[in-house]
Image (cartoon, coloured by chain):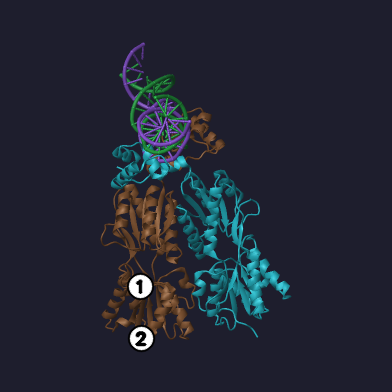
Chain colours: A brown, B cyan, C green, D purple
Amino acid sequence: MTITIKDVAKKANVSIATVSRIVNNKPGYSKETEQKVLQVIQELGYHPNGLARGLISKRTHTIGVLVPEISSMLMSEFISGIEHVTHEYGSSVIVCHTESQGQKTRQYLQVLKEKQIDGIVFTSEVLKKDYYQLIKDMDIPMVMLSTESFDFPVPYVKVSDRRAAYSATEYLIKKGHRKIGMISGRRGDIIAGQPRIDGFMEAMKVHELPVKDEWIVAEGFSFEDGVNGFHKLINQFPEITAVFAASDEVALGILSAAYKMNIHVPDQLSVIGYDNLRIAEMSTPPLTTVAQPLVEMGKKAAELVFEMMETNRSVESRIFPHEIVERQSVKELS
Amino acid sequence: MTITIKDVAKKANVSIATVSRIVNNKPGYSKETEQKVLQVIQELGYHPNGLARGLISKRTHTIGVLVPEISSMLMSEFISGIEHVTHEYGSSVIVCHTESQGQKTRQYLQVLKEKQIDGIVFTSEVLKKDYYQLIKDMDIPMVMLSTESFDFPVPYVKVSDRRAAYSATEYLIKKGHRKIGMISGRRGDIIAGQPRIDGFMEAMKVHELPVKDEWIVAEGFSFEDGVNGFHKLINQFPEITAVFAASDEVALGILSAAYKMNIHVPDQLSVIGYDNLRIAEMSTPPLTTVAQPLVEMGKKAAELVFEMMETNRSVESRIFPHEIVERQSVKELS
DNA sequence: ACTTTTAACGTAAACGTTTACGTTAAACCA
DNA sequence: TGGTTTAACGTAAACGTTTACGTTAAAAGT
């Protein structure tokens, strides 16, 4: 027994067209009928049916967000930003947890298409050709967040991984460190892995410090990668005084491993992280790290898809500034 | 130029009814026409329009999840579980970030109604009367996650906060601690605050240990609450040897504050947390805590709403078992 | 051989809106 | 006064499906 626009129309003695006009306040009715209709709507508790609306207007006020890992704190912050502006625009977000699986990604893309969503933000993954094709066929705006495509013309929102890694490394150097290791994402990872390694290498080079390949252990971005990587690193490079972690989770892994090995941070070992997640200030010691403005980036990504929706044109990519947040995991060497 | 069922029908020389039957594989067509139609669908790249479908079938294959704080790790895990089974059921989830604001909650409820979603999971908040009324009017299944209602008959998925707190406290006692403080959620919080305090009190009472009101500082569940609370606690109760934190975030706050005050955990102070978030194993020292099976609970909550959808009847609530996860933040006193 | 069943469709109404277009009466104008 | 504009509506088509019902011809039954 759901009540429709017809019920309202009947009870208010007007046509459904008039009710529609009033609900969407488009011109074409008198003050009095407006009053009347509004009152009837109240009495009946009428709410328009979004499906019927969307069928005609071709707008569902829904966007899709594709994330590889939903319970990562990075994603939480991104989603938080995205949700915020999406809600401001009167829309809502469907979260699609791809688990980095092509299968699930494609499934979700199908679903999103059938649901006729208005836009997509694609997060932290490489945009494969068939993903791109699928989305392109949907003919809706998409923007990439914390990733970019070298093959397809999709606007993105990012910080410069390379430069941020450069900054982090340089920071350690300026603090007097010379023997610096890195625990990074995989080299094969064109988006977040290799660029950060490049930035690290470049900083070392510019400051005329030696690097060996074994100084860089390329495992991944997780906590476990951090602890495993640190063991590997400390074996091959015992004289190390500082390490640059390619993510805060990795940094926490290092902290944890060091603690167990009775290596005191920062007195015996300095650690700098990457991301500035909320846990960065919760660790012991609090983590010095290079910050990405995560929530802001999420917001901007969403804003861009709405801008594209409204203007019907593409939009420029944004490189956000990174920033070193000094806490207590790095010590100045004298 | 989106292509519809009509285009398929025309090109395949059949009626739209037949196409529809084939797409939804309901009986009423021959093998050959099926072949033909399927092929045409391929060629044209036809995808059914979910809006039109939903308009008739009254199913949108979408559920809404209301969360107070999206970037909390607790929520991440819940959402992760919910998303998982929702996807298995061929549906998707809209996340609604209420920020614990009545305003935003009501807005989202409106939106969800207009979107004609199939079900709701309501998380970690008290269900106010008007929320309940709004949802009841939508006439769709809802289940509560990590919260419950004493006023309305809504099935829920929870652990027993009281008993879990009891267990945590008893664990400390069994480890030889006698002077135990607690940093908890607010007393006014009927859902997660007071019950945990009650559990704590009860365990102390049963083991004939004294408690003063100042031993319990009721601030909230955040990291900051943990550090502030610990300062307050240690001032009023310097001889303390252990503290029960009502959340892992609070526990981290305690760890952090203790570290700065040069109080060594666990040698000088034992800390037990609550939740078993992923960070619990990342902290230094790794946090002993009482675990809620967060992902499982999220899964179950979603399963229950789908069960209610299918059977059209309500469902029994579930109390999940908690469990002490021993790590290294609690020391045995001898 | 005749009726009855059944498989394989097609027709058209329905779902709940928006909106182009038509209609009416009042207001306005010269 | 007669014509023109305008405000305030109503009518009906359209959006893309699903589905109850009707139709036809072949298969089955007696």
Position above or below: B18 against B284: above
Q: Chain of mark 1?
A: A
Which residue is found at the position 35% from the left and 53% from the top? A305
Q: Is residue A74 left or right of residue B154?
A: left
Figure quadrant of the N terminus of chain A: top right
Depth check: give the residue in front, A85 or A135: A135
Residue labelled with disc 1:
A185
Q: Which mark is residue B178?
A: none
What amino acid is found at the position of numbered circle 2 in the picture?
Gln
Which residue is found at the position 41% from the left and 79% from the top? A228
Q: Which mark is residue A236?
A: 2
What amino acid is found at the position of numbered circle 1 in the picture?
Gly
Find residue A179 and report its horizontal and vertical position in percent. 34, 85
Find residue A139 and report its horizontal and vertical position in percent. 31, 49
Find residue B298 and report its horizontal and vertical position in percent. 53, 60
Q: Is residue B265 left or right of residue B114?
A: right
Crowding near the residue tagged with mark 1, few <14, some 14–19, many ≥20 C-alpha atoms within 10 Å: many
Secondary structure of the residue carrying numbered label 1? loop
Depth check: give the residue in front, A127 or B200: A127
Report whether residue A159 is seen.
yes
